[in-house]
Amino acid sequence: MILETRPNYKCYVDYFWPRSKWLEENCLIGDLDYLGAEADKHVNDPLMQNIPAYNCVSRTYEGFNNVNEDLNHGTKQVVFKKRPKDVQKRIHKYVTEKWTLKEYLYSYYVHRSTGSGFYASKPWHGYHHSVVTHFGMYETVYEMADLMKRWKKKGNKMFSTIGNQNPTPIKGLNLTEHITTFGLDLIIELAEHLENNHKAGNAPFTQYEVFNRCNQKNLDRGMRRWNFPYAQMGADIGTYHPHLIDPNSSLYCGNNAVQAIEQMFLKPKGMAKEDFHDAALKNLTEVLGTNASAHEDTLCIFTRFMNNLDRSGNGYKNASGYYMMDKNDEPMYPDKWRPPGVKWYTKKDDNNLEELFT
């Protein structure tokens, strides 16, 4: 089905995405200066050039995926030289060549369940309170679980709530206990399930199939769904193990991505929400390339871009000339760099700023 577009579709397709792509290729991966003459010529946007949260369209290089890249590609990754010095030293100690599928899956699961090291615009974005960046120095999932228990006992921080709320554990357990018991068993069983499907000669699972399977395990134990961690873990598996999960299949969209989709497309009457989101991701993939997983992530960032989210405190604004729109396609707050509620919320609790947009 062809979806009817709204004005902000052009902002994403013609303005934001191409500029983010240029920054990724030339500044994030390449060595050009974000504020140099070439960037001014091709981007010319104060928010995008000054805040390193709007510089990526390939999910692979997004900061919240740094740890996954480190664990999968180590010193051979293109951006290794740009990693913080302490991270580079740690990667040299990795023993991931001894890992089985279980270790990779458990790393993705824990990474997404603990906040993905998220702290956009900070030098340590992607590593904030990350225990998973240390997993590469251990050979088995059991050693990784033990490391989490030791960190918990010592009071080491392992969770980031800046980008997303932490999921809810089984009643009676704290989140570390949940991840190192129920979560560990979940991942061991999932690894076996994925490998058996592949060995049987079957097609890779879709991201939705694995997402629904994991959430059903939660429901069977009387728990809430873990939509964000399971969706992102499925995308991780598809990215690094495409023979197990189809990386080009569609996926559950987080609240920020949903908000962006609703800013860009009109939902046909009677169309199911998931079908609407899938159709939007399909449209963007056909027009711009990459895949649904990459656009789901870029759409989350686009919502922040439209709200001029800037943690530097300098009040940078985007230069697109577009605004968040109401249902009548009228600008919601054209004269403000943030809606009033966000400014108040920031003063009260900066760690929860992005919850207002999720």
Image (spheres, helix red, strand yellow):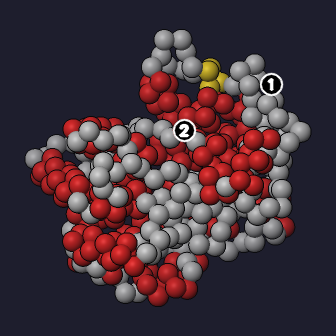
Considering the numbered disc 1 on the image, is that residue within a helix, a strand or a loop? loop
Q: Position of residue 344 (x, y in %)?
A: 76, 47
* Outermost residue, right side: 335
Residue type, mark 1 in image: Glu
Q: Residue at x 75, y 67 (%)?
A: 34
Q: Residue at x 73, y 38 (%)?
A: 11
Image check: 78 left or right of 183? right
Residue type, mark 2 in image: Asn
* Outermost residue, front side: 172
Check the image and report above or below for 202 versus 92. above
Q: Which mark is residue 330?
A: 1
Using the image as rendered, state which of residue 350 and residue 328 is in the foreground. 350
Check the image and report above or below for 10 versus 267. below
Occupied quadrant, residue 42: bottom right
Q: Position of residue 254 (x, y in %)?
A: 50, 41
Mark yes or no: residue 242 visible. no
Query: Which residue is denoted by mark 2 in the rendering?
Result: 255
Considering the numbered disc 2 on the image, is that residue within a helix, a strand or a loop? helix
Rate crowding at label 2 as few (under 14), some (14 to 19) or many (20 or more) other CA atoms within 10 Å: some
Q: Position of residue 262 (x, y in %)?
A: 61, 29
Using the image as rendered, state which of residue 36 and residue 261 is in the foreground. 261
Q: State which tag comes first along the sequence, 1 or 2.
A: 2
